[in-house]
Image (cartoon, helix red, strand yellow):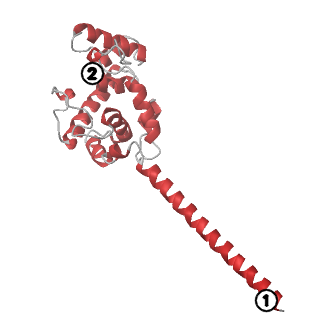
Amino acid sequence: MKKRKRKKGKTIFVLLILFFIFIMIKQVMQVSIIEESSSIISNDPFEDAKKYSPIIRDELEKYHLEEYTTVLLALMQQESRGKGGDPMQASESAGLAPNTIKDPKQSIKQGVNHFQRAVTYGNQKKVDFPTIIQAYNMGIGYIDYAAQHGGKHTEELAKKFSLLQVNKKPKVYNCGGNKNNFRYPYCYGDFTYSTKVAKNIESIADSVPVNSGTADEAF
C-alpha cells in the first residue's frame, strides 16, 4: 500500500511539474508574440508621415482633392519620411531656398498647393497621372515637356527633361560632383521619383483609412 501511495505521489508531483512547465512555455510564447507585434508596429516606415494624414486631408479638401490623401502621404514619405520642419520639401515650389519653411503645417499647405496646381495643369494638358507626380519633383515644366512627347511619363522621358535642365545650369545640377550618384548625369530632380511614389502608395494604401481610388487607379 505504501509503495502504491508513493507511486501516486510521484505521479502527481511529475504531472504538477509538467503542468507548470507548460504554463511557463505558454507565457513565454505569448510575451514573444506581443513583443514581435510591437516591434512590427514601431518599425512602420510610414509612421512619421501618417501622423500628418488629418492635416493633409483638411488641406486637400479646400481644393476638393481629398481622395488624394494617400498620394500626398506617399509624396511626403519620398520627400522626407515625415521628418523635419518641411516634410513636403515644399520650399522650392514657393520660390524659396531648400528647407526655408520650418513649420510642418506651412509645408503641407504649400505642398498641397503645388500638387493641386500640377493636377489642374496636368488635366488641362491631358497627361497621365505619373507625369503629374513626376512634376511635383521636377516642376510644372515637366508637364509641358511630357505633353509635347505623347503625354505619358517614362523614366527615359524624365532623363531627357533632366538633362535639358542640367545643360542650362551645369554647375548647379551636378549631383554634388559625385559621378557615382545613381542620377548622374541626370542631376536635375530624380527621374525615378514617380516610380518610387507609386511603390509608396501601394505600401500604405491598405493601412491608411482614406478613399484614394482615383489616384490608385491612375497608376
What's the mark number on residue 5? 1
Q: From the viewer's perspective, is 51 left or right of 168?
A: right
Identify the residue at horizontal 59%, vertical 68% (top origin).
24
**Residue at the disc numbered 2:** 140
Q: Is residue 129 visible?
A: no
The residue type indicated by label 2 comes to Ile
Percent of width and height locating residue 17:
66, 75
The local secondary structure at tag 1 comes to: helix
Percent of width and height locating residue 95:
16, 25
Q: Quadrant of residue 131?
A: top left
The residue type indicated by label 1 comes to Lys
The local secondary structure at tag 2 comes to: loop
Q: Quadrant of the N terminus?
A: bottom right
Establish if 127 lies above or below 149: below
Q: From the viewer's perspective, is 193 left or right of 21?
A: left
What's the mark number on residue 207? none
Name, please, the residue furthest toward the bottom: 1
